[in-house]
Image (cartoon, rainbow, N blue to C red):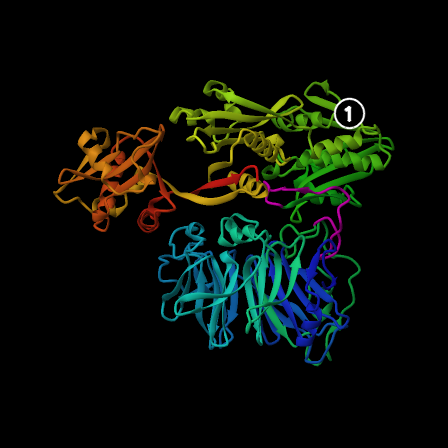
Amino acid sequence: MSTITADSTPSLQITASQDFASWLEQQNLSLAFTTYQTNRLFFVSGQANGRLKLHERLFDKPMGLCVAANRLYMTTRYQIWDFHNLLDSGEKSQETDRLYLPHTAYTTGDVNAHEIVLDNSGKVIFVNTDFSCLATISPDYSFVPIWQPPFISKLVAEDRCHLNGLTMVEGKPAYVTACSTTDTAAGWRNHRLDGGVVIDVNHNEIIATGLSMPHSPRWYQGKLWLLNSGTGEFGYIQDHQFHPITFCPGFVRGLAFWQNFAFVGLSQLRSQSFTGLTLEKRLMSEGNRPQSGLMVINLQTGEPLHWLYFQSVIEELFDVVVLPGVRQPQVIGLQEEEIQRLVTFPNSGGIVTTKPTAKRPSKGAKPPIAGLPTSPPTPLLQGEGSNHTPPFPTREGGLGGLGQTVRYQRVYHLTSSNALNYDELTFPRLQQRWQKTPPKGELTGLSASLNGSIVGFAIAERLNPETAEIISLFVLPEYRKQGIGTRLVAYLEKELKTQGCQDLILTYSTSLLTNTALEPLLQRLQWQPPQINGEFRQRHKQIQTPNTTAEIVVLDQPTVQYYALQNLTVEQSLSYNHLSFPKIQPRWSRQQPKGQLVGILAEVAGEKVGLVLAEIFSTPPQTKPEVEVISLFVLPDYRHQGIGTGLIKTLEMGLTALGCEQMQLVYKSTDITNLALEPLLKRQKWQTQVNFLLGKTTTEKVSQAPWLTKYPLPNKFTVFPWSELTDADQKQLENLDYPTSLSPFGNTPAEPLNSLGLRYENQLVGWMITHQVASDAIRYSTMFVDKRFQRLGRGISLLSLSILRQVDSTVPYCLFAVQQENPAMLKFVHRHLEPYLMEVTNSYVAFKQLGG
């Protein structure tokens, strides 16, 4: 593997193929790529000593890149940057032979601009993803649309199809990629597996379908190349089909060419948009993990030639470009001295360096710099792109188990002046405190940051050499109940102890916030009981004790005890309703358990903090029992500490001992399951697949669908309430050829309001079965029509009549469940029903083999 020389984050860990640096130098080229996840523009190049050189600068959400002669264009959060090279051909600035200056920024607004190109007249064209169009810049407007897909009915900031990539042919826009052909807000998110398309811009027609989140179309050597991101494949389009030539171990996005080589960007599968893809399943089946970085592919063989992988910090790449003939590129950043002091003018003889100013001319806090991230990746440290290894342990899973890292860092040289820069992150507010009582002692600050953005802050003031007072503790609301505040105080205690402090004081007023958040925190850290003086309370803690280190350890790994709850009855399980998710009480009100209930209870210091419940179903002799996990829950204050994982693992061991062979769990895709449950299942090697498509709407909204009254039934068909099913119907039903999954009979009785049967000349030929799953909601569960009448639209007629009966009732919500194995019905939902739905999600079923 190659060695990296980096003027970038020291904690950035990179590996590369052995001869990658030498190969770049031999080819006489460098690469540039963007990662909006960490707000960085990178250059990578080879050196004569066989080492790679990595150069980075900060910009606000950099995405698309375009190289044109001595210019570099880049899309960012709300601007398009035009960089100019300051060096003439053959000229160098130290070792740099290409020095880009951020020359002009065009303000577009936050339109989620993706890829950017220049046409044959030099006009800037970019993919305006939020507005689902191609656009150009204008001195009079934020942007001027120049083309939109034929299926997009209106230009609104709704990211309807996730238009993302554009390629040119002979200097004109030719082909674009989109993740779907939907015309509803964020509709593409439900079509990630196979809804992707390639569109011919000039002919306004779709030339390839069935792709999985395609990106980066490129016309090169007479072929239309692209990245089928959701499958991890690089290939080309021919005869309306995608032909893969290389599988890459990551979400592929960002593509460039040089001679007979392709450069492909790789991203990890960290966000909700990346889960459930074919790529994820393939990597899991091969025992591999997704990578973030770059790959070089030989176009003649399809074989990977070189690679560069990021092992930390960088999880996603967006775009890649080649800089031919460039050995050592650099870009001048927005917050370093060079952008102030390097100037050029006619007949200057090159770059002129001006004299530095003695001090900043303005007073007060340093103003924000346009073009930089609003929260810089390392806000507590000096220098652009700098970082250091934090002196405190890091905590994985800071954002609901997304695998991101919360870093706890000492804020050095904190004074009463610069501390006010963080006033928005203090509680009580320091500005108000110091107006009454100015600080007298040294300040010690500790920050918690996630992806470089501060999410929590704690500050202590030394009253004397032995005593310190915590004067502020704050965590952003969206990051609370994840243990960040507790760790801030714990690590602050540890830092003050190293400074010789022996006693800590904390004074606070009683309020709902301090009663529910601060006091339980102090109790966990074993602070002394409060001394009460009116509305104020004061607590102390001796930190020069042998138990201090042990307390820190307990924070990260609480002592948890797991107890088995076997042979549970329904009544007993209801006593744990507050520890269940989904709630057990409504489940039992709809259907009673058919098998044996078992559970595992988690306790910390005698407090019940978590529970997992499962149902073991009876099976025929000589077969293993079947198990379904029906609830998994951990109290919010105890999440992200491994307790949920411990509950599942303990349950697995108990079920294995009972002779069970497989367990399954059915869940709905929600923010909670995406952020907490799915990472847990993935770590425990569960296999997951889509079970149902789920839709939700109101009778008021669905009643607007024109097809509800468009397909009346001919005279030979009659509809009847399913509750009036006759014995003759029962016998005829036995002769119908229908899948078991579409049986009209289940564990729960059909809803009499709008469960319907369909007869043709007095012969039973179909049904629409619904269930009332809540007092205000009816689920449309099972629909079947004999294959003789399916193509005639009789199923739509039956569904319409069922919906119209609910429209005339007082039950306001309609829920639709369509099995993944029912492609015809899925197609109908996407085409005709989806525009009238409030919400579209998936139901998943996860499996785990036991005893393996």
Q: x, y (%) of residue 729? A: 19, 34
Q: x, y (%) of residue 281? A: 52, 51
* Chain part drawn in magenta: 379-403
Q: Is residue 273 above or below residue 473?
A: below
State whether the magenta stretch is mostly helix, strand or loop. Answer: loop
User: Which is more toward the observer, 646 or 432?
Assistant: 646
Specify whether residue 841 is in view: no
Q: Quadrant of residue 424?
A: top right
SS at circle 1: strand
| Local crowd size for mark 1, using a 10 Å CA cut-off: few (<14), some (14–19), many (≥20) | some
Residue type marked 1:
His
Q: x, y (%) of residue 255? A: 55, 66
Q: Is residue 182 above or below residue 103?
A: above
Q: Quadrant of residue 432?
A: top right
> Is residue 386 part of the magenta span, yes or no?
yes
Residue holding disc 1: 540
Q: Is residue 257 above or below residue 752?
A: below
Q: x, y (%) of residue 401? A: 60, 41
> Is residue 601 part of the magenta span, yes or no?
no
Instruction: Give the quadrant of the C terminus.
Output: top right
Side (left or right) of 141 relative to 653: left
Instruction: Give the quadrant of the N terminus.
Output: bottom right
User: Which is more toward the observer, 415 or 194?
Assistant: 194
Specify whether residue 449 is in view: yes
Residue farthest toward the front in the current orientation of the protein: 622
Side (left or right) of 390 relative to 753: right
